[in-house]
Amino acid sequence: MAASDCISCAKYYWSKELFSVGMNLHNSLESLHVYFVQKNLYPFCRAKVAIWMYEVAKFLTVSQFTSVRSTNETKRYLHSSKLYYFDAVFPLDWEDDTIENVKFVHDNNVDMVLVEGSLDENLIPSNGNLTHGQIGRLVMLLLLKGRLSDEWFKKTIDSLNNAEPWREFVIQYGTFLDMGFAKIPVITKFESALRSTFAVNWIREKDYLSPHFFIYLVEILLFFASSCQGLGGQFFTTKSSLLQILKCHGCKGYMDTCLSVLPVQSDIRTPMEYIITTSKNILREESNVCLDKQFLLAHRSQVYSDTD
């Protein structure tokens, strides 16, 4: 056998072996993720597993020994690792969030690369425009990521051309991160963007911002607004939103200045009033849904009793 043939066979063998070992490792991590979810363990455990899955899939995707067919398979694993990470960093049950999750996000550099990959996925428009769901996830990731490079910032702004309220917020938010002042314009733009999203007829939307994520953004707005009210160094927040604020690199400027006493301004009252009104509407709708369910159950029980 010629030397070139021997080298070719060796490359083929080791590429197959490398991919096989990598996929077995990824499947094991997938099983570990499922176990953590079933046991309802802390989100930072699931975030660790998601990052390990991402690193394995990323290595296999860019490896010169991975075939085109195998690359398509690893790209699917890349996507799933981003979803797992997002769910871990923004847990559905806020009571599961812990300070360990906050420390993990800040102490791990790989996760910022993963966040950038998730940002990129949410910048892909559907029928020419970003959906409300994409915009919501995009803003949450922006808060987590913090300052963007000029290239990423321009790409983000361009993708929001058909969502002007959110575009204005992101621009103002970027100005605050770069300059370190103008907090109040960030709050008013944030409130306007949330107001525009809440007014949308979500039934007609293909991908609407989930109630969980909407409440998350409202809580961030509450933290921002109340920290500017000048209440003697005190402000309103919840444990879950405080942990999220500590987790977000993009909120560090607010954490550095949130206890500074500022005069109460009318510009802040409007967002605060909006938060109160929106919270009441959401609670009212939730109450109506519960009443509707009780009515349906009572109606079904009556129907069954009549047929007996």
Image (cartoon, helix red, strand yellow):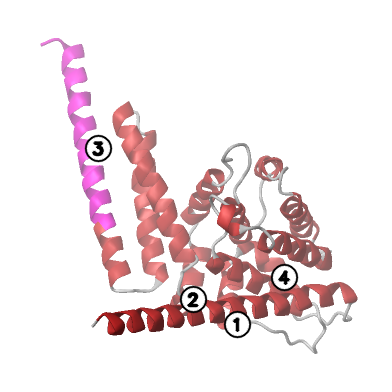
Q: Earlier in the sequence, mark 4 or mark 3?
A: 3
**For this view, does 282 lie left or right of residue 44?**
right
Q: Amino acid at mark 3?
A: Phe
Q: Earlier in the sequence, mark 3 or mark 2?
A: 3
Residue at which label 4 appears: 254
**For this view, does 134 lie left or right of residue 180?**
left
Q: Earlier in the sequence, mark 3 or mark 1?
A: 3
Residue at which label 3 appears: 19
**For this view, does 107 lie left or right of residue 162?**
left
Label 1 to label 2, Cα distance in Å?
Answer: 10 Å
Judged from the image, the secondary structure of the residue bearing numbered disc 3 is helix
Label 4 to label 3, Cα distance in Å?
Answer: 45 Å
Q: Residue furthest left?
A: 1
Residues at circles 1 and 2 in contact by the CB criterion of under 8 Å: yes
Look at the image and tell me whether residue 66 can be seen: no
Magenta segment: 1-30
Residue at which label 2 appears: 94
Q: Amino acid at mark 1?
A: Thr
Label 4 to label 1, Cα distance in Å?
Answer: 16 Å
Q: Amino acid at mark 2?
A: Trp
Residue 72 painted magenta: no
Residue at which label 1 appears: 238
Callout 2 crowding tier (Cα within 10 Å): few <14, some 14–19, many ≥20 = some
